[in-house]
Image (tube, rainbow, N blue to C red):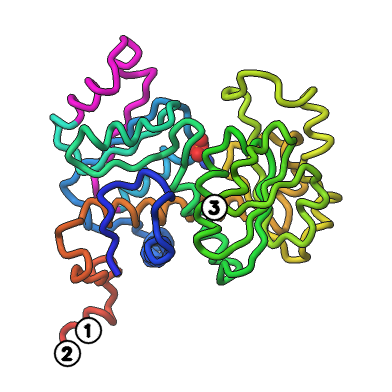
Amino acid sequence: MTFTQRHLLGIEGLSKGELLFLLDTAESFREISEREVKKVPTLRGKTVINLFYEPSTRTRTSFEIAAKRLSADAINITASASSVAKGENLLDTARNLIAMRPAAIIIRHPSSGAPHFLARLVDCPVINAGDGTHEHPTQALLDMLTIRERKGHFDGLTVAIVGDILHSRVARSNLLALTTLGANVRLVGPPTLLPPEFRLWGAALHSDLRTGLGGADVVMALRLQHERQARNFFPSVEEYSRRFCITPVALAEAKADVLIMHPGPMNRGIEIDSRVADGPYSVILDQVTNGVAVRMALLYLLTMQGKKVQEEPMDQLREETPSRRYAARQ
Ligand code: CP
């Protein structure tokens, strides 16, 4: 199996085989981050640009760390500290960036479709790091890696995604990935934040937290996206929290070995209780760790395309140890 996509613009359109191949490749990169020297020469001489038009802690940092662990040069551009603040449009920014010959551009943008627009302009791979309310594919991939790490499979798992579904690119990408991989997805939240058309993608909709969490194997809490809410979708934050905050009492409805996930940043006490976020079932920081492995895998696969990805031995990623040196001499 190879990954022949030129860009990663979304989970939509990826097959089960492609998703599993990305997860398998990410798994092989996870070990590099456990080493004392967390660096391999794979992308030496290549430049990766992080183009972020929205704030980010996890995604931007982990793309930068992933690039650096592969020995690429990582350049960060934020809208507020670039010529975007002086009125430059995305087309001109893209033309200028491509003139500097990057190996890949990672883009986060408040407008849905901005990465697709960029991908049509540039001659290097583009990775969507979150576009408007559309998709956040690398978040879904790191979530899949975390679920598989703990549960070993996806078939028949019940995953409850709770919160502001309407404005969540994480919910869309996760719904697509989970249903493709064989899990059952419940979307849970106030009716005003539950788009009925998501049933067409195989989701069950729940407006009651207790029934939504009943028997769930995985509970994924989402952030309330105040910045994307053009009007009031519920009476007050207090009312929302009373009905939809994941508390230890609400969680009692789920399976005994439930996994608790959150993409971050968290609004503690609003969508998730600290006792749950920091509790024994939480894998929230594992998600962050897995984000680096997923992004290393994507940078590797997308920038090495046409360079014999299949034949290029993963050996070069393996640490040289005295026993391996000895084996190579035999
Ligand atoms: N999960 C996520 O996208 O977090 P950041 O906004 O910090 O990148």
In the picture of the structure, the residue carrying the numbered disc 1 is 326
- For the point 43% across and 50% down, the residue is 11
At label 1, the amino acid type is Tyr
| Dot 3 crowding, Cα within 10 Å, few <14, some 14–19, many 20+ | many
Identify the disc placed on residue 330. 2
Apparent side of residue 329 relative to residue 160 in the rendered image (left or right): left
- Kindly identify the amino acid type of the residue bearing the numbered disc 3: Gln
Q: Give the labeled residue for mark 3.
A: 287
Q: Is residue 154 above or below residue 199?
A: below
Q: Which span of residues is magenta-colored?
A: 70-97
Q: Are marks 2 and 1 in contact (CB under 8 Å)?
A: yes
Inter-mark Cα distance, 1 to 3: 37 Å
Q: Quick one: which residue is furthest to the bottom in this view?
A: 330
User: Cβ of disc 3 within 8 Å of ligand 1?
Assistant: no
**Three-letter amino acid code of the residue under disc 2:** Gln
User: Looking at this view, is 31 or 113 the one in front?
Assistant: 113
